Image: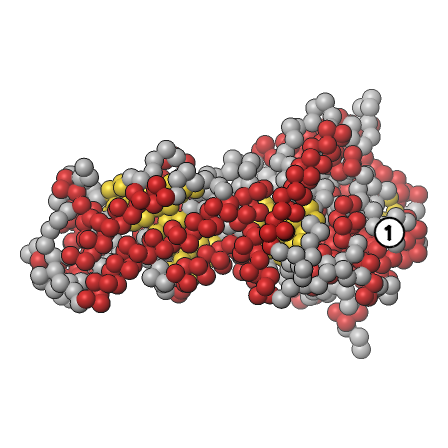
Amino acid sequence: MVTKAEKFEHVDYLWDDQIAASLDPVERLRYRSNALGSDQRITNTGGGNTSSKIGMTDPLTGEEVDVLWVKGSGGDLRTSTRANFASLYLDRFLSLENLYNQAEVKGVKTGIEDSMVDMYRHTTYGLNPAASSIDTPLHGLIPFRHVDHMHPVSVIAIAASKDQERLTQQIFEEEVGWVPWQRPGFDLGLVMKEKLKQDPDLKGLVMGQHGLINWADDDKACYELTLALIEKAARFIAQRDKGEKTFGGQKYQSLDEEERNAIFVHLLPKLRGLISQKNRFIGTVHVSEPVLQFVNSVDAPRLAEIGTSCPDHFLRTKIKPLYVDWNPRTESVEALIEKLEAGLVRYRADYAAYYEACKHDDSPAMRDPNPTVILIPGLGLIAWGRNKSESRVTAEFYSLAIEVMRCSEAISEYQGLPRQEAFDIEYWLLEEAKLKRMPPEKEFARNVVVVIGAGSGIGKAAAHRVAAEGAHVVCADLSLDAARQTAEELIQKYGVGIGVAGTGISGCGPAIALPVDITKRESIKSMLENVVLAYGGVDNIIITAGIFVSPDKQGYIPDDKWALTYAINATGPYLVADEAKKIWQAQGLRTSLVITTSANAAVAKQGSFAYDTSKAAANHLVRELAIELSPLVRVNGLAPATVVEGSSMFPRDRVISSLSKYNIPFDESESTEVLRDKLAVFYAQRTLTKSPITLADQAEVAYLLSSNKFSKTTGQIISVDGGLHEAFLR
Ligand SMILES: [Zn+2]
């Protein structure tokens, strides 16, 4: 017997009757949506929507009413929860057709069409705060209980082909109709309703340059129909695969992973600087066999110029990518950079010309004219976004667009969206309003902050502090386990975001963990190279790594420990700055370095020679680096004193020896935390502010010195010591 799952070769069949039976009707819709969204061949991240018309009790009358549950604005099918679905009284929603028909001027892109979106809120059932999307009429106006609207690669390939109507007929015969491209909205819903009126046997429609919509009165049947239609299209395409002749055949050869990464490490900071002069971007490197087959091909320049077709894709990928014609086997990296520079100048000019040619009187101002997708033969695809999640989505969308082009060119000729239509989506006033409603970007949203020493103490607190400002945080530490712990805490708190793309470390989320030994230049270099591969560059660095070797009563430590103290506390920050300098200079973007020194650097006393003198060297290193790295990098020092809370610098034996030294009564059986608190209270009493000094106090200043709030401060040491008059700098 052939099972349901075996009938599908090109899509994942995930429906489980037992699970579905245990769910209420709204949860069944959520379940169906998650199943559809989890297969990229069925729909892209954030793309498509689903709906169910469900009989429910009206809280006002107690009567049974039909409620349209439909995926709301924003959100993503794969990760949707019940909260992502809007709910509308179906009869009230349908009554909007009268309102629409009363308008003097109506039709696609008319004022009434856009103003209908605001009316959907008036039909809300059950005080549901989820906002309805512009696709709501596509679901509401179709008289079937369940509707799926997907963006499947194989169906978009048909919809983006020159002879899309004929292909639809050939593949689906009488089962599925075709509607030409039209910007989604109320009018498109009416067009579909009319189509169905003329041919009540239709099970779905191919939407020109867009995707697929289909329906059924049973939810499982609707799910299976969606899969069956996509499978049918995919099989038709697979039978016509061009094999080695795909994309006109291969023109260039790929580089192996090692060569490729060496080039990326060199190239990405430079490229990031070139496109980030207006706004900083975060990168994602995506290298897969299908992507390489495309970038290496004869047809890549022609197809890249046509641009992406699905409107959902190109809002992120822009109307077209920047393709650079470079031979990876015979040309140098320097030649590649020159070609990229020239290509970017051309791209921006093209974008400005497109804006000028297509703009309307009320269009929003031109947005950042830099490309968000860059294609390089032999290397792959580099995507850019305002944060890691967005750049992963962009990489995902263009790699899906490549699949669409491959499939379309196998059966016909690939066609892009007309430029004016593309513009009317990109600069749609409704989209602009959505952008304006978004909360303002956080200060470090477009920044990559490397915290060295992030596994514990001040470093861990600083990692959390900058993450709260939206930073992408590289948790670097001698102990990879400790670094991982911090990175996992951040990911737990902020989530990995959406988007399924990124090769190797570049597929990461908003935080990563890397091992580093700052006494070794090679280790620092390798850590920073991984940061570049993960995010495309490096912005702020905060160094909190340090060592205090407990001396004997006279303050002595063995000679090798003296050397180690200097290697970590003074030479380490220098090596980090020296290695980061190459990346910072390639980027050419203003940034900052914070080095943790110590109040001890300014106070001569007995008992900790090595530590105190190494920290004095670090203080002066701050000043010299501020001169050396000017004007690109501000360098400042954070000088803590006696933070005992959670500090690796205060292991139990040091706490006990300090308590004994100051004659503070304690019991050996007490926990380390209790002993630390006793010491903290004692230290607080020696300060001018008389309050214990916490990790949060230190992290706050590490963040402030990194931020633009201190944009005019460099070469300074800021003490966070509760006020120790003997440590005042003069
Ligand atoms: Zn769509």
Q: Residue furthest bottom?
A: 1
- Percent x, y for residue 269? 53, 49
As rendered, which of 376 and 533 lies closer to the eye?
376
- Percent x, y for residue 524? 41, 59
Q: Quadrant of the N terminus?
A: bottom right
As rendered, which of 71 and 38 lies closer to the eye?
38
- Percent x, y for residue 249? 80, 61
Q: Would you say 512 lies left or right of 15 here?
A: left
Vertical arrangement, residue 6 with respect to residue 315, above or below = below
Label 1 amino acid? Glu
Residue 626 falls in which quadrant of the image? Answer: top left
Q: Residue furthest left?
A: 663
Q: Residues within 10 Å of mark 1 (few under 14, many from 20)?
A: some
- Percent x, y for residue 403? 75, 57
Q: Secondary structure at mark 1?
A: loop
Query: Label 1: which residue?
Result: 413
Residue shown at 46% from the left, 56% from the top: 528
Vertical arrangement, residue 141 with respect to residue 477, above or below = above
Can the viewer see residue 500 in this picture?
no
Residue shown at 69% from the left, 27% from the top: 363
Vertical arrangement, residue 176 with respect to residue 245, above or below = above
Q: Quadrant of the C terminus?
A: top left
Q: Would you say 55 lies left or right of 161 here?
A: left
Can the viewer see residue 138 in this picture?
yes
Q: Would you say 306 lies left or right of 412 here?
A: left
Residue shown at 57% from the left, 42% from the top: 274
